């Protein structure tokens, strides 16, 4: 049992160090001494040895260079950390202190599946709350390739073009109810008629005039003609 | 169980009810007029009917009571006029239902059909505007649709009275079973839990439970009448529990499930062409809301209105009626007759004196106001029936946004140019109480009704165009400023601008004629008695010398502050009864050469902003409550005289 527990702690330490290497590298620092100083970990040296043995990184001329496995592991942990930060601060509106604390815990335990879900839920954010880049995951690549050119805000639909509604962001319940009573629900096809002085949309044989505010809630997929 | 509950209800003494229900602007009122032989206003824009109308119909020796209702998009109301319709369904006794659907817009109609089926009430479906659907290449299989719904389906062209007779034969008496729509599991679960609390409603419990799940606040009143407090809070709890299971609001999920069913039915009964052919009226309709071309079209329509109402109505027609008909043909012989046969001076005065009923009240009402109002009603009817009014809302949405409203507010405001009293009632089509209050205030403050507007246009037609433009500019400026302030000071929220644009249609002359006559009749009934009352009032003031006294008292206000002749006081006194009567008084002063151009502008700005007429005042109390009405009046008075006075000083300062 002790061995298992010890192993977990070791894993966490490795994660922390990989994270540190990554963030230092972002600041342009690859110096090993600097790493040891910032690490402030008494056992750091022994852990570093384990890490080198595990083929995570190499030291050349006192410079730390991540190897392929280490790079991947580091990217994942940074991604988990920064996504968690965003989730906690934006969705749950927690204070920065709590966010940091929790993110440090969660970064070790989030499974790849949950990480993807969080990323998708947040709309594949490119940066963390401190403005640093969040490493892209597979889901982001998919989003870029399949979704991005397809799902657009209704506002961006060209004049005379048709779009199938993909989703409507529920800013107010009443608005959503009213739109759905007029047949505006995901799956319905809209045609953009004009944008000024008001938006005019065609749905079936119904012509509707709407505010920009309402239109901004609607996202569509272009229908090919 | 349900049918037991229904049968015990007492039958209405005035016969079984036939309720017309359907989306806005599908032709319910036309069908109502056909079935009852009565006339309710018919126009080509959503929201014409804001109040329930009832009329009798006789068929096969039986008497029915037909009910026309405001249009709805869903039986979960989002505005006051929709609530009116839904509440009718909640009241017993059971009735025959006729659902009118615009055949072109079958999808939206079926969304309501499904809700009616869920309610377990029988109905006849009338697919109206069959001709328009056909010309667009839309084909609907009536037999299949009827099979899907389990209800009779008829096609009709109501404006040409085609297919309407069949409604009478198809008033379906029994409920057929309809395979219920299944909603997401958590919703179904919530429904079955709520069911156990509900009393026996006039509609199916399931539909009521669904309405409650959506958090339909307009049901609160009904609930409190029929259920104990604790059960209401239990229902509320269930609703919350169900809602936590979804990200989207329940009402939206329910509508989505219904629309899926609708689309399933549509795919089996309807075929429509890939490309709808472009028609001339569609192109013109598009031009009318075009960001560029819409403006010259708007100006052209305004110009035509001015020519017809201001020139033809207020000058040519008034000249003829007032000077020739009344001044030469009617009044001199009548005066002679009265002087010969009624030898009592005071009665002579009362009839043909300077404040006489014939010489003042009827001359004003028939010779001055009527031709102007009549012309306006014709133009207005054309605008209504062509479908231009909602397009005006599109053009003006941005302006109304500035004052916290949206383009939809243009409908009551433009209707206010017809009659502010009616327009105050039409504020019901707006979605929030805040919107309704602001529009009621603006209507009461500065939207001149047709009678007043006509008289005003008539007075300006003799002056350089600058004066008319200055008047328009000032009134618009004041309305914008007051609206802007009101939007910031009043609590509550504004609403979204979501408005349906009906197709542009060629107005039917017969409907314009009927509508104009109905409005003129209404004007005569409404205005003439008040004109006579106002004249009597002035007559008494004049006889008792109180008029001179009042003129003296108000000299600082009227003469010094506004810079008008003392006689203008009379116009403002009768203006308390009707603003148009007051304006007509000013019209006469101007004709007699007692007002110079500056005085005309000042007096007209003041009378335009003056307090609303008595009928509008009562309508405001009815719609907004006494407290708000008194507040609105308290705001209006100082604005009217303040604006007039400031303008007077400004014009003098500029040396105009």
Image: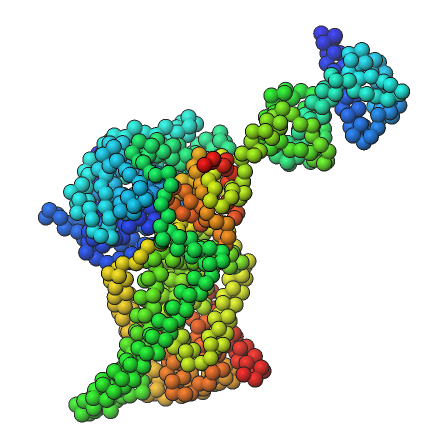
Left or right, B330 with reference to B388: left
**Observer-nearest of B159 and B234:** B159
The residue located at (33%, 38%) in the rendering is B272
Q: Can residue B199 be seen here?
A: no
In the rendered view, tell whether residue B152 sits above or below residue B435: above
In the rendered view, tell whether residue B606 sits above or below residue B243: below
Where is the N terminus of chain B found, in terms of image quarters? top left
Q: Quadrant of residue B549?
A: bottom left
Left or right, B251 with reference to B121: right
Where is the C terminus of chain B found, in terms of image quarters? bottom right
The residue located at (39%, 71%) in the rendering is B306
- Percent position (x, y) of residue B632? 46, 65
**Observer-nearest of B315 and A108:** B315
In the rendered view, tell whether residue A82 sits above or below residue A218: above
How many callouts does the rendering have? 0
In this view, the residue farthest toward the left is B61
- Percent position (x, y) of residue A225? 45, 36
- Percent position (x, y) of residue B192? 37, 28
The residue located at (38%, 51%) in the rendering is B282
The residue located at (87%, 25%) in the rendering is A31
């Amino acid at each position: 049992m002790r061995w298992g527990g010890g192993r977990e702690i070791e894993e966490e330490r490795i994660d922390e160090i990989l994270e540190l290497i990554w963030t230092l590298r972002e600041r342009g620092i690859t110096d090993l001494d600097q790493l040891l100083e910032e690490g402030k970990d008494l056992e750091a040296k022994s852990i570093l040895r384990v890490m080198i043995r595990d083929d995570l990184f190499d030291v050349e001329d006192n410079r730390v260079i991540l190897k392929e496995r280490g790079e991947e592991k580091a990217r994942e942990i940074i991604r988990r950390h920064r996504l968690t930060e965003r989730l906690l601060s934006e969705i749950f509106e927690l204070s920065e202190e709590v966010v940091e604390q929790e993110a440090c815990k969660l970064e070790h335990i989030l499974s790849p599946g949950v990480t993807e879900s969080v990323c998708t839920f947040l709309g594949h954010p490119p940066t963390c709350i401190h403005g640093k880049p969040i490493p892209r995951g597979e889901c982001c690549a998919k989003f870029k390739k399949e979704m991005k050119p397809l799902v657009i805000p209704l506002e961006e639909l060209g004049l005379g073009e048709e779009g199938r509604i993909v989703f409507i962001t529920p800013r107010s319940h009443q608005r959503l109810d009213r739109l759905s009573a007029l047949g505006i629900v995901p799956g319905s096809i809209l045609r953009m008629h004009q944008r000024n002085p008001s938006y005019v949309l065609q749905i079936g044989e119904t012509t509707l005039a709407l505010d920009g505010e309402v239109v901004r809630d609607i996202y569509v997929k272009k229908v090919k003609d | 169980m349900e049918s037991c509950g229904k049968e015990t209800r007492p039958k209405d003494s005035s016969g079984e009810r036939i309720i017309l229900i359907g989306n806005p602007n599908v032709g319910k009122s036309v069908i109502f007029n056909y079935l009852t032989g009565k006339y309710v206003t018919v126009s080509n824009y959503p929201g014409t009917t804001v109040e329930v109308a009832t009329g009798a119909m006789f068929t096969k020796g039986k008497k029915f009571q037909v009910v026309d209702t405001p249009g709805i998009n869903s039986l979960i109301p989002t505005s006051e006029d929709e609530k009116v319709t839904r509440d009718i369904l909640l009241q017993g006794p059971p009735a025959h239902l006729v659902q009118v659907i615009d055949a072109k817009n079958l999808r939206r109609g079926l969304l309501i059909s499904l809700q009616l089926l869920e309610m377990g009430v029988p109905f006849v479906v009338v697919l109206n505007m069959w001709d328009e659907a056909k010309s667009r290449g839309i084909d609907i299989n009536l037999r299949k649709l009827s099979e899907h719904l389990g209800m009779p389906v008829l096609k009709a062209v109501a404006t040409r009275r085609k297919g309407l007779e069949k409604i009478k034969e198809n008033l379906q008496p029994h409920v057929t079973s309809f395979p219920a729509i299944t909603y997401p599991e958590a919703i179904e679960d919530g429904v079955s839990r709520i069911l156990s609390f509900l009393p026996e409603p006039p509609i199916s419990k399931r539909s009521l439970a669904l309405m409650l799940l959506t958090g339909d606040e307009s049901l609160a009143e009904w609930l409190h009448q029929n259920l104990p407090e604790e059960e209401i809070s239990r229902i509320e709890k269930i609703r919350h529990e169900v809602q936590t299971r979804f990200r989207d609001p329940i009402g939206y999920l329910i509508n989505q499930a219904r629309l899926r069913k609708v689309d399933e039915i549509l795919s089996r009964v309807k075929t429509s062409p890939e490309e709808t052919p472009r028609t001339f009226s569609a192109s013109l309709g598009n031009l009318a809301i075009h960001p560029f071309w819409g403006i010259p079209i708007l100006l052209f329509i305004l110009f035509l209105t001015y020519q017809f109402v201001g020139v033809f109505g207020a000058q040519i027609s008034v000249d003829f009626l007032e000077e020739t008909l009344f001044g030469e043909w009617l009044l001199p012989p009548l005066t002679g007759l009265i002087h010969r046969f009624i030898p009592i001076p005071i009665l002579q005065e009362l009839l043909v004196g300077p404040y006489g009923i014939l010489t003042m009240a009827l001359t004003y009402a028939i010779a001055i106001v009527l031709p102007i109002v009549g012309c306006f009603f014709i133009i207005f009817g054309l605008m209504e029936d062509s479908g231009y009014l909602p397009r005006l809302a599109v053009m003006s949405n941005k302006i109304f946004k500035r004052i916290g409203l949206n383009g939809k507010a243009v409908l009551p405001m433009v209707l206010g140019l017809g009659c502010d009293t009616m327009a105050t009632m039409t504020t019901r089509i707006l979605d929030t109480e805040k919107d309704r209050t602001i529009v009621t205030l603006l209507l009461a403050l500065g939207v001149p009704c047709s009678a007043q507007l006509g008289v005003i246009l008539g007075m300006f037609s003799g002056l350089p165009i600058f004066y008319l433009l200055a008047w328009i500019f000032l009134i618009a400026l004041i309305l914008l400023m007051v609206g802007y302030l009101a939007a910031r000071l009043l609590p509550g929220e504004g609403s979204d601008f979501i408005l349906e644009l009906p197709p542009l249609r060629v107005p039917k002359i017969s409907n314009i004629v009927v509508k104009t006559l109905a409005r003129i009749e209404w004007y005569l009934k409404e205005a003439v008695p008040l004109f006579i009352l106002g004249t009597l009032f002035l007559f008494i003031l004049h006889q008792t010398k109180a008029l001179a006294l009042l003129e003296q008292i108000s000299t600082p206000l009227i003469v010094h502050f506004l810079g008008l002749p003392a006689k203008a006081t009379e116009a403002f006194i009768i203006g308390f009864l009707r603003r148009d009567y007051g304006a007509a008084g000013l019209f006469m002063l101007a004709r007699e050469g007692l007002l110079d151009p500056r005085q005309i502008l000042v007096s007209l700005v003041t009378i335009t902003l003056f307090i609303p007429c008595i009928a509008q005042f009562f309508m405001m109390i009815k719609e907004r409550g006494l407290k708000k009405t008194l507040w609105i009046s308290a705001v209006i008075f100082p604005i009217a005289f303040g604006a007039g006075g400031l303008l007077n000083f400004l014009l003098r300062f500029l040396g105009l």
